[in-house]
Image (cartoon, rainbow, N blue to C red):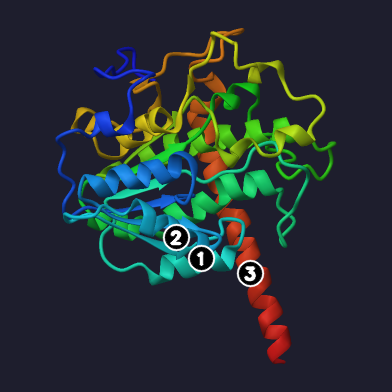
Amino acid sequence: MADDLITTPFGARTTAVEVLAGIDLSGSRAVVTGGASGIGRETARVLATAGAEVVIGVRDLAVGARAAEEIAPAGGPGSVRAALLDLADRTSVSAFVAAWRGPLHILVLNAGVMASPLERTEEGWEMQFATNHLGHFALATGLHGALAAAHGARVVAVSSVGHVNGDVFFDDINFEQRPYDPWAAYSQSKTANVLFAVEAARRWAPDLIAVNALNPGRITSTRLGRHIADISDSPASFDPTSTDVSWKNIEQGAATSVLLAASPLVEGVTGRYFEDCDEAGPHRPGVRRGVAAHAVDPHNAGRLWQISLDLLAGAAGSAADEAAAVEL
């Protein structure tokens, strides 16, 4: 992290609309995962209102189509449409990537699941890691050519303050040897989001692709926390009376995503972690703010990148072997 932290005139109570006031995104194309609800929906709406052509990636196309119709601007150049995208399904991600044509200026990796009961993909990957990190990794790397073609694209990885609770457990990412802990799995996946931004920023700098991560704050009234009631030992950090974390409404929660996606105030900024529309300082124990050292470790960022490539390649190889066996 740089010694001089980047600040903006905005803060914890700023809304996404206020961040993009007066900014014209006509001619820009954006993808927002999880754009049918919560801060993803608001991010998509505000980008479109500013003139961008927005595609929201959704698991339920009927729900996504209704959301796109509801949030599309009534007039002007901006638009919103839905496309099928299940981040836990390699085939779905591959199909989305294959269908994309032309440059991509903005990619917001927003979709996620939090503290869910143990589930696995068909490959055996733990669902939070598979959805929050691996699916987004496959999407972003698959769209790398489209991002490079934009000559100044931005990738935004929506992480969480929950990343401070734990690093990526490289020796057992998928909880095959240790007991499953929903919060440890969540923390690992959110740390992975930041590590992705660190390594992608390094690798993609020659392509003029800026990649940053963020903590949106604790957002009220979204579906992200739907599993918390299923867990008997939810951490005390989710106490809404806490003064160590910013509780926000959806309009405020989308502000930092929109800032990193489109504001000229952070043009050229890459490989950073933001919260409340400013670059975050180092995390201090006992305070639910800042970025943990393990999440910006360049060695771990490179290690996670290679492991992610290996997991996806191995899964693709297994699928090819199965197809060949069927043909024989």
Residue 223 is drawn in which quadrant? top right
- The residue indicated by pointer 3 is 317
Q: Which residue type carries mark 1? A: Ala
Find residue 206 and report its horizontal and vertical position in percent: 26, 45
Query: CB atoms at circles 2 and 1 under 8 Å apart?
Result: yes
> From the viewer's perspective, is 78 left or right of 318?
left
Residue at 20% x, 50% y is 51
Q: Residue at x 71, y 38 (%)?
A: 227
Rendered location of residue 308, percent (x, y)? 57, 50
- Mark 1 packing: few (<14 Cα in 10 Å), some, or many (20+)? few
Residues 241 and 171: in front is 241
Marks 3/2: CA distance? 37 Å
Q: Label 3, label 1: how many angstroms apart (C-alpha)?
A: 32 Å
Question: Is label 1 in a helix, a strand or a loop?
Answer: helix
Q: Is residue 328 left or right of residue 112?
A: right
Residue type, numbered disc 3: Gly
Which residue has dot 2 on it?
Answer: 66
Closer to the camera in the image, 306 or 127 = 127
Q: Which residue is mark 1?
A: 62
Q: Is residue 326 left or right of residue 109?
A: right
